[in-house]
Image (spheres, grey):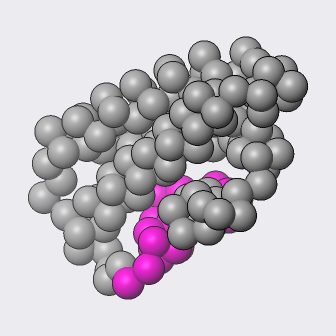
C-alpha cells in the first residue's frame, strides 16, 4: 500500500531542492564557476533532488509489489515497464542516476560544465518526475 505521507514528505523536500536550484540558474557560467558556493550548492542539491525521486520511485515499486530493485537504474526501468512513466523519461532518469553516481563517487573528477548544463537544462526532468509521483497522493 502506498503511504501518501512518505511520498508527500519527499515531494516537499524535492520542491525545496528545486527552488534552491532555480535560484542558482540565474548565474552565468563565469559567475557560477568562480564561486565554490554556487557550484558546490548545485552539485549537492542536484544530488539530493535525484535521491528524492529515487526514494519515491523505490517506495512506489515496493508498495505496489512491482518488482525487485537491485540497482537505482531498476527503478525507472520497472516503472516504465509497468506503464507509470514513458520510456523517454526512463532514459532521462537513468542518465540522472549516472550523474548522481558521478557526484557521489567521482567527486575528484567532477566536470563543472556538466553540472552547469544539468542545472540549466535538467530541472525539467526532475519536475516531470515530480508530476508523475503527485498522482500517487
Query: Looking at the rendering, in which quadrant would you find the C terminus?
Result: top left
Nearer the observer, 79 or 9: 9
**Camera-side residue: 131 or 126?**
126
List x then y, in percent, for residue 40.
Answer: 58, 38
Residue drawn at point x = 85 percent, y = 28 percent: 29
Count the marks: how many? 0
Closest to the observer, 115 or 76: 115
- Left or right of 83 in this view: 54: left
In which quadrant of the rendered view does residue 91 lie? Answer: bottom right
What residue lies at 25% left-to-right and 43% top-to-bottom?
7
> Residue 54's quadrant in the figure?
bottom left
Residue 43 place in picture, x, y as percent: 58, 43
Rendered location of residue 51, percent (x, y): 41, 53
Left or right: residue 110 compared with residue 45: right
Q: Is residue 35 above or below residue 132?
A: above
Q: Is residue 77 left or right of residue 90?
A: left
Name the residue: 33% across, 56% down. 55
Magenta stretch bounds: 70-93
Does the magenta segment cover residue 82? yes
Q: Quadrant of residue 11?
A: top left
Q: Is residue 124 shown to the viewer in this render? A: no
Assess whether residue 36 is covered by the magenta stretch: no
Coordinates of residue 95 in the picture (x, y in percent): 67, 63
Quadrant holding the N terminus: bottom left
Amino acid at each position: 500500500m502506498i503511504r501518501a505521507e512518505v511520498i508527500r514528505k519527499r515531494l516537499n523536500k524535492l520542491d525545496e531542492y528545486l527552488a534552491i536550484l532555480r535560484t542558482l540558474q540565474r548565474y552565468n557560467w563565469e559567475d557560477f564557476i568562480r564561486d565554490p558556493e554556487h557550484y558546490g550548492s548545485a552539485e549537492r542539491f542536484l544530488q539530493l533532488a535525484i535521491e528524492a525521486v529515487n526514494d519515491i520511485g523505490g517506495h512506489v515499486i515496493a508498495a505496489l509489489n512491482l518488482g525487485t530493485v537491485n540497482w537505482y537504474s531498476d527503478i525507472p526501468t520497472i516503472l516504465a515497464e509497468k506503464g507509470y512513466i514513458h520510456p523517454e523519461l526512463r532514459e532521462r532518469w537513468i542518465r540522472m542516476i549516472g550523474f548522481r553516481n558521478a557526484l557521489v563517487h567521482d567527486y575528484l573528477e567532477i566536470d563543472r560544465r556538466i553540472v552547469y548544463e544539468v542545472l540549466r537544462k535538467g530541472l525539467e526532468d526532475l519536475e516531470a518526475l515530480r508530476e508523475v509521483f503527485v498522482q500517487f497522493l
